[in-house]
């Protein structure tokens, strides 16, 4: 049952405490008062009386409403913030509809709607949060629909696929895997050979703990297509290796990670080493698995910023290698 709207509840699983954007909580502590934002809104609205369609004034009004909503959320909860955030969303969506090929407007719309949904969920309003997720997907479907005239189909497909890719990136922090899958598939419908969309969807399926045989087969297929577009990118080979590994195709998993290793000197990055450890373990090569795992830990300590994907592969390795980690008293924390 939905809880009280007046104060946000404790953070739920998978929801970021600071909100979608890194500066949201800082905005909530902004020394300006609600009265300051109210005056800004009044000023923008008075200026717009003479120029109601001026894009800069409308953008400024949307920003003022959104910033007031952030302040209201942190000071009084979602009941106070909701009208301001929704007014900002309405203005941005109207602007995006008028200028569909301005990617920053669609990205701003996506960010605002995701943030509102996160706050609704944090406040215990599960049903309202789900409705906001659906509204986001519906607005993107409407705004990325191919026009009957204007830019070429190819140009539109390129723009729409990029818009969906950026939306999928926005969905990473709140952990919206279901929606990310929908969004990535929509992007690929516009541009089936988009390398980043292929990689992201393959990775999403390959890292999914409960993925069945059909999804893993699809992950392998997507990763193969991604590798064909970017054979010199090691992260593409790693996702292919992981998909093969989870599909229990150890020879192809080994070949894929070996291709990634070729692209890096000194026995690869931490992710490569973790993959080699998992493949070695599954092939019954305990000593090799231990050696690669220790090498991965060393790399993560020595070069902590080098490999942003390493934590994801470490999470996988901790599950696959649990027997040897326990038996050998090996740490799963690269900082120890």
Image: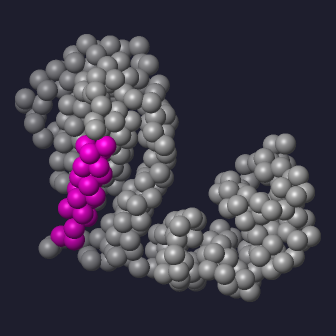
Q: Nearer the viewer, residue 60 or 249?
A: 249
Q: Nearer the viewer, residue 85 or 282?
A: 282
The part of the image, by quadrant, that contains residue 291 is bottom right
Residue name at image x 80 percent, y 80 percent: 283
Residue 161 visible, this angle:
no
Main secondary structure found in the magenta portion = helix
Left or right of 164 on screen, residue 308: right
Residue name at image x 11 percent, y 23 percent: 46
Q: Quadrant of the C terminus?
A: top right
For the record, the magenta segment spans 126-147
The part of the image, by quadrant, that contains residue 88 is top left
Residue name at image x 48 percent, y 69 percent: 201
Residue 275 visible, this angle:
yes
Q: Where does the image place residue 59, in percent across and percent down from the top left? A: 25, 37
Left or right of 122 on screen, residue 109: left
Q: Nearer the viewer, residue 42 or 249?
A: 249
Q: How is the image coloured?
A: one colour
Whether residue 313 is in magenta: the answer is no
Q: Where does the image place residue 91, in percent across and percent down from the top left? A: 19, 41
Count of labels in the image? 0
Q: Quadrant of the N terminus?
A: top left
Q: Nearer the viewer, residue 231 or 136?
A: 136
Q: Where does the image place residue 303, in percent across and percent down from the top left? A: 80, 50
Left or right of 17 on screen, residue 252: right
Whether residue 132 is in magenta: the answer is yes
Up-down: is 94 above or below 225?
above
């Amino acid at each position: 049952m939905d809880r009280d709207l007046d104060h946000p509840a404790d953070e739920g699983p998978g929801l970021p405490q600071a909100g979608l954007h890194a500066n949201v909580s800082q905005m909530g502590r902004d020394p300006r008062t609600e009265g300051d934002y109210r005056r800004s809104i009044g000023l923008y609205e008075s200026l717009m009386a003479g120029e109601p369609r001026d894009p800069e004034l409308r953008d400024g009004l949307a920003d003022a409403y959104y910033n007031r909503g952030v302040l209201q959320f942190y000071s009084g909860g979602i009941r106070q913030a909701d009208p301001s955030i929704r007014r900002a969303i309405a203005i941005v969506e109207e602007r995006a509809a008028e200028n569909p090929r301005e990617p920053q407007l669609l990205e701003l719309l996506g960010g605002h709607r995701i943030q509102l949904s996160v706050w609704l969920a944090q406040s215990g309003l599960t049903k309202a949060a789900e409705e906001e997720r659906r509204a986001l997907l519906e607005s993107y479907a409407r705004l990325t629909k191919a026009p009957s005239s204007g830019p070429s189909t190819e140009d539109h497909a390129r723009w729409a696929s990029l818009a969906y890719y950026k939306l999928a990136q926005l969905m990473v922090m709140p952990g919206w895997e279901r929606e990310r899958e929908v969004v990535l598939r929509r992007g690929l419908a516009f541009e089936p050979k988009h390398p980043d969309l292929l990689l992201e969807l393959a990775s999403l399926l390959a890292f999914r703990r409960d993925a069945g045989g059909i999804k893993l087969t699809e992950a392998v297929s997507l990763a193969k297509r991604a590798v064909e577009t970017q054979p010199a990118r090691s992260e593409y080979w790693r996702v292919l290796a992981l998909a093969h590994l989870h599909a229990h195709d150890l020879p192809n998993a080994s070949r894929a990670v070996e291709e990634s290793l070729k692209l890096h000197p000194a026995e690869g990055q931490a992710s490569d080493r973790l993959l080699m450890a998992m493949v070695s373990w599954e092939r019954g090569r305990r000593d090799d698995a231990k050696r690669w795992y220790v090498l991965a830990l060393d790399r993560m300590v020595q070069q902590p910023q080098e490999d942003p994907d390493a934590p994801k592969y470490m999470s996988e390795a901790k599950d696959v290698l649990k027997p040897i980690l326990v038996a050998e008293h090996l740490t799963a924390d690269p900082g120890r």
